[in-house]
Image (cartoon, rainbow, N blue to C red):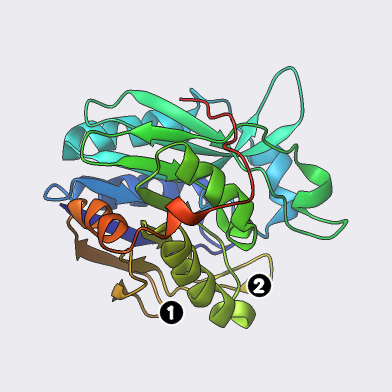
Amino acid sequence: MRASLIQLAVSDAEPPAERRARAAALVRAQDGADLVVLPELWPVGGFAYDAWASGAEPLDGPTAEAMSAAAKAAGCWLHAGSIVERDPDGPIYNTSLLFAPDGELVRTYRKIHRFGFDRGEAVAMGAGQEIVTVDAGFAVLGLATCYDLRFPELFRALLDGGAELLVVPAAWPARRAEHWNLLARARAVEEQALVLACNTAGTHGGVEQAGGSIAVDPWGRVLAEAGPDEQVLTVDFDPAEVAECRAEFPVHRDRLLGIPAPVQR
């Protein structure tokens, strides 16, 4: 299988409509990929707090429309990163969008853990409630977003939901780049799963982004890693390695604590 992580540069200077068109073109160019991943909140910027309310959109809004068409054109599964979702009956959410190769929006994930410590996302957005896995045929995907990486209990629940490949879009800042790399590898080792973690590049809301998008195998080995600037990171992987790793080193059968969490499919 082949995945393309589009480490998009996000800046306050580029209008969201222009960035949306540019991102769609980059997705369409990945016609050899089975799975394409975009970063977190790329249409408006993960730290551009002042733009969230005006940039919020419904699940059938302009970003979803553009990404659906791009996924269909490329014939790939597309994790379109996340948008600021406008729920007409509630708050705004940090919501990921997953499209099938025919362009259908098959699943969404509202980010559970909100970053900000009494500011930003922590106070401006609602918290998701559902743990989400999706059977994409080649692997069961487990969906998480950015700050979620710091909460291993979420990933253990994804494991219990059958996850084999963990997809993590992010807007992770440069000042904590080492944590990003470490946590992505830790989640791969803990769950004996593939991890595809796609970050933003550039600077938005005055916060420099780390880049460093990364693909990790179930043993914690780095398959591919991006630099700090915008780029498309392409990685070939074998989903069968997950089952092989879990059979060769069956650590999960020795679990004594915790019970499987309910999973929405």
* Disc 1 residue type (three-letter): Pro
Front-most of 14 and 126?
Answer: 126
Count residues near mark 2 (Cα–Cα under 10 Å), then give few for <14, some for 14-19, many for 20+.
some
Front-most of 133 and 211?
Answer: 133
Front-most of 113 and 98?
Answer: 113
Q: For the residue labelled by badge 1, is the local secondary structure a helix, a strand or a loop? A: loop
Is 14 placed above or below 17 here?
below
Q: Position of residue 25 (x, y in %)?
A: 27, 48
Horizontal arrangement in the rendering, residue 245 relative to residue 87 (left or right): left
Q: Residue furthest right?
A: 118
Quick one: quadrant of the C terminus?
A: top left
Q: Position of residue 50 (x, y in %)?
A: 75, 52
Is 218 placed above or below 169 here?
below
Q: Which residue is mark 1?
A: 228
Determine if residue 210 is in view. no
Q: Position of residue 93 (x, y in %)?
A: 67, 37
Horizontal arrangement in the rendering, residue 83 relative to residue 242 (left or right): right
Q: Which residue is mark 2?
A: 207
First in sequence: mark 1 vs mark 2: 2
Q: For the residue labelled by badge 2, is the local secondary structure a helix, a strand or a loop? A: strand
Front-most of 82 and 229?
Answer: 82
Query: Which residue is located at x 28 percent, y 27 percent?
Result: 103
Is 251 placed above or below 123 here?
below
Q: Position of residue 124 (x, y in %)?
A: 80, 44
